[in-house]
Amino acid sequence: MSTMKTTRDVRGIGLSIPRPDGPEKVTGHLQYVADIKPKGLLHAKLLRSPHAHARIVKIDVGKARALPGVRAVLTAADVPELKRKAPTRAHAVLAIDRVVFHGQPVAAVAADEPSIAEEALDLIQVQYEVLAASVDPLQAMRAGAPPVADRGTEADTSEALAHSAVALAKGESNDAKGVNVSQTSAVKRGDVAKGLAESDVVIEHTYRVPMVHQGYLEPHAVLAEWDTTGALTLWASTQGSFNTRSEVADVLGIEENRIKVIPVECGGGFGGKIRALCEPITALLARATGKPVRYVMTRREELQAGMPAPQVIIRLKTGAKRDGTLMALEAETILESGAFSGTVLAVSAVFLGSLYRWPAFDIKGSEVLTHKPSVAAYRAPVAPQTIFAIDSQMEHLARALGLDSVEFRARHLSHPGEPMVNNVPWASNGAHEVLARAAEHPFWKERAAWKAGSSDRSLRGTGLALGGWLGGLQPTGATVKLNPDGTLSVLTGQVDIAGTNIALAQIAATAYGIDIEKVKITTGDTDVAPVTGLSAGSKTVYTVGVAVMQAAEDARRQTLEIAAGELEASVHDLEIVEGKVVVRGVPNKGITLTQIGRKGNLYMSKVPPVLGTAHPAFSQQAPAFAAQIARIEVDPDTGEVTLHDFVVVQDVGRAINPLGVEGQMQGGSVQSLGIALTEALTYDETGRLTNPSLLDYRKLTAADLPSIETIIVEVPSPAGPFGARGVGEPPIVPAPAAIANALEDATGVRFTECPMTSERIAMALIDHRAAATRKA
Amino acid sequence: MAKQILRCTVNDQPVEVLVFPYQTLLDALREDLGLTGPKEGCGTGDCGACTVHLDGQPVASCLVLAMQARGRSVRTIEGLTSGSGLPSGALHPLQEAFVRHGVPQCGFCIPGVLMAAAALLSENPRPTEREIRYGIAGNLCRCTGYTKMVTAITEAAATMAKGAK
Amino acid sequence: MRRFELVLPHSIADCLKVLAKRKGKAKVVAGGTDLLPQLKNGVINPPCVVDLSGVAALKTLERAKGKGLRIGASVTARALELDAHVRSAYPAIAESGALVGSVQVRNLATVGGNLCNAAPSADMAPPLLALDAEAVIVGPKGRRRVPIASFFTGVRKTVLAPDELLLEIAVPAPGPHSGGNYLRHTPRRELDIAVVGVASQITLGGSTCAKARIALASVAPTPVRALKAEAALVGQALTPALIERAADLAVEAAKPISDQRGSAEYRLHLVRVLTRRTLTTALHRARNGSGRK
């Protein structure tokens, strides 16, 4: 393939190489789950609760079962192995006696056609006793609020911890804690009251970012089929085939090695597909019918009953002295998790209390359950919302003190080695470098001229913000084998969501010493691949990259040992050049990789096949930071924001594949802008979603955006492959703060609630002008 | 319920297929004709993943009943190059530019974007950046942020304009 | 979608026969951009759908200089967006067509569907209202003409009886020294529904305004005209101050609700802003005889 040729260098690190699956994608050949159509396929539909909280009195499926073309109708009564108290969302396959969010599955149908399945749903009669629902997290926290979780349900912190790899001490148990507070945390240092009392300027705001949907274009989809031995195969759109396998095994009570999860190309996940959701029910329908069953969520179902990002409310009070010394920070963070626990309190505390150096801080966090769909992760979970708070606050403090806001940030920004709120030192990172690079950008330097240069009535402003991600960790494995023709095959279990496979190929090629064209990366299913974690947490290249590198190095070692035997030379004198192992300085004395590969597969040969393996675990995170600059124009009457320019500066450690890295930076930036400007899942007072369509859940279109400029900074990480850091998460973090800062620059108004819609801006400007008139 | 006979042209080939009255064109293409390039992202015309050409115009095929395509010509991503004079297996300049610029990430939106872009370029061979952005504004993409798409479409337009001379 | 029968008439007469036979239990579909989402969401569940795409008589767009416009009910938003004559002589209609959904939706959406679906936010209604257009309706008893102003009776309700079909929209020529403009506010630049839409149409007589029409969408159960605002302009020289006054009066004609697309307060504010802007552009076009380029 011409697009894969490396023109100058065998070693692939740093080359912009298009992903090898590009042609499959641009021709429409690549298959996603909904494209797979086995013989005898049945279609699934789920009946979902119309109430946010209700007791199920009675379910009658007789008429539905009798509809011609219907092959199975299931309710909880048909599945005795379901746990009475669902400890996690994945276990809540079909509601047993109570529904806890609008959209929770109550019954499931498999039929010959989707239309028949839909009609069957209409024929299922459910009698509900509607109960009061906890819809507002602030009210849900109070004693006496309608309870969400069954007593004894544990807060589900396993994935949260894996995703963030930061542990915090549990908050002190509080007897007056409301029944829906499922997790608490508390970290303190110094005397905050004293610090605030001694401050010259104290600023307090409450920042709020609503629940948002990850917005992947491909809805959740799964195809399930059992064989006659009772083994289950799942073709799934998932970010983690092993995770899915474990969850399905646990929910259905069967062994993991009786389940094969085949990770089909995933049409976007961003954290929304890290947990099992549709797999268990689809598997149950397949078992009940003895046929392959496919379930694809509608967009409406995705928005109503997916696994969104939590609502985040942060009350933040900070004090500083006139000379800019930071004195104290007090924060209360509330994460609304929906009906099941799943948020990461720790991340918020770390960024609030230790991104900048606060001599005294007191940060309390609560996770609150409500009668809404439970959350999963969304690209740097909780970080965009937290940075929205702390960066906005730093900007506001700087303005109040009359100080340059970038210098103010740089002065107080933590350095590697300084303690985070949990007293673990900050790992090496490029936060300072990124901030400095952003400050050099002409958009930042020329912001006064931009502001003054409006040729019509539009208000102009420039905003800058800094944020990042701590970097995830998860053990993993990889194998590298030398084929009889001298090519390499690399096997991982890693779902290639972010184009990581090409980066892994570049790593393998460089570590082994071979041309990239000769390397193939395969993502294996759970039967054949080494156990591996989620494609999430910005840890794929950082962890799987290391595994691939080590496996390739192992394969290289084996190759050289075999060659040393064949050539009667020392391994130290050998090198691999253009597909041949040669003695350094003696180019005509050598053995080709093809010859070595063939010997490893010959009848009666004493030469083993080359199989490099690695299965590392990791303990060192690699935080990665990004700064974004937004230049905006605001229509002072309609409040409409035109995003004129946008820049993202990001520390990637080492850009293994700059083309791929840029794509991640741009995509993450636009998701970040969506949180800032237009996106929100809105619920009415009964807990029903009022915008269950892409008409009213607004994602930004190409017409709303400028070209996103990307600037790559490289501060190598100590443990990442060739110094690489995770790339996917940092770019979604800073934009809400950058936009809020740009709006303050343009209008004089500080916005503390996302999304910063044209309506909110217009109405705030009206109030602002009225207040200014009153003062005059 | 009885099916109806849909007769139309799909990717330059005459087609005769039985469809249900309530099937959408998207559904018929995917399930009955095996053309799974066009995708369902929302089913309500709000995302563009199902974009195909109907009599040369880009439409949301999830909003078209299959029988409404009777007697008409449909083109899907699989047929982007058929009837264009390019040798079989070759990529359209838009497809080549998308691959070269690393545009596809998860890939789900790509067939729809390419069909919208192809329609834009046949109507407007030298679009400005603004015109490109509005031309694909009906196609939501969550992975790329659109920047590389605009670059690739601009480049493909130049390539095609040169070729047309 | 739930299952339904589909009928494929070739002519208006065929169509009327089917509608009469089904006694109100059939729904017609043209572009499908409103009907299919409603079917998929289960908002409606008709046993029979009648496809109008085979009825050529509904697709004609006829114009003759000075004699007005006849827009067949199945003419698409995209056709209106691109038609040179519409753009130059009836710019507000072209503008409203251009704003519907996205290009993939505009190639399907019809003016007839937009009007008969009768959403309060229907983009194509205000310009037609401002141009004194008439709906030509055909039924078992023959044809009747209904001014657009009387066509809408409530949210999603029109004067069409279940056995009637909208045939075409008749738009009288606005006359020399006329100009019009349609603007709407949406949270994004494409794919959205109007939070507020305003169409203004001005005809000058010498240096004063001879005729003024201001029509509003999304601020009442149906599209409405701002009669007091119109009256304030007629016979007057259209100064910025007077335009501002008309904008204030237009606000009084609006009775918006607060829903998740916008609060009532914001909508009233937008009525003022968009009335001012559309009147200014309409005036400019009336003076210069130029439409949407």
Image (cartoon, rainbow, N blue to C red):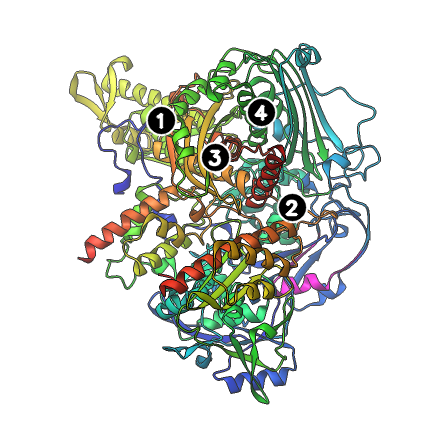
Answer with the quarter of the image where residue A192 lies: top right
User: How busy is the neighbourhood of tag 3: few (under 14 within 10 Å), some, or many (20 plus)?
Assistant: many
Q: Earlier in the sequence, mark 4 or mark 1?
A: 4
Answer with the quarter of the image where residue A611 lies: top left
Q: Secondary structure at mark 2?
A: loop
Q: Earlier in the sequence, mark 3 or mark 4?
A: 4
The residues colored magenta run A106-127
Mark 1 and mark 3, same subunit? yes
Mark 4 and mark 2: span between their CA atoms? 26 Å
Q: Are marks 1 and 3 in contact (CB under 8 Å)?
A: no
Q: Name the residue beneath numbered marker 3.
A: A494
Above or below residue A656? Residue A1 is: below
Q: Amino acid at mark 3?
A: Gln
User: How busy is the neighbourhood of tag 1: few (under 14 within 10 Å), some, or many (20 plus)?
Assistant: some
Q: Name the residue beneath numbered marker 4.
A: A393
Above or below residue C104? Residue B71 is: below
User: How busy is the neighbourhood of tag 2: few (under 14 within 10 Å), some, or many (20 plus)?
Assistant: some
Q: Are marks 4 and 1 in contact (CB under 8 Å)?
A: no
Q: Are marks 2 and 3 in contact (CB under 8 Å)?
A: no
Q: Amino acid at mark 1?
A: Pro
Q: Secondary structure at mark 4?
A: helix
Mark 1 and mark 3: span between their CA atoms? 27 Å
Q: Amino acid at mark 4?
A: Gln
Q: Name the residue beneath numbered marker 1.
A: A608
* Chain containing mark 2: A
Disc marking residue C293:
none
* Chain containing mark 4: A
Q: Are marks 3 and 4 in contact (CB under 8 Å)?
A: no
Q: Name the residue beneath numbered marker 2.
A: A682
User: How busy is the neighbourhood of tag 4: few (under 14 within 10 Å), some, or many (20 plus)?
Assistant: many
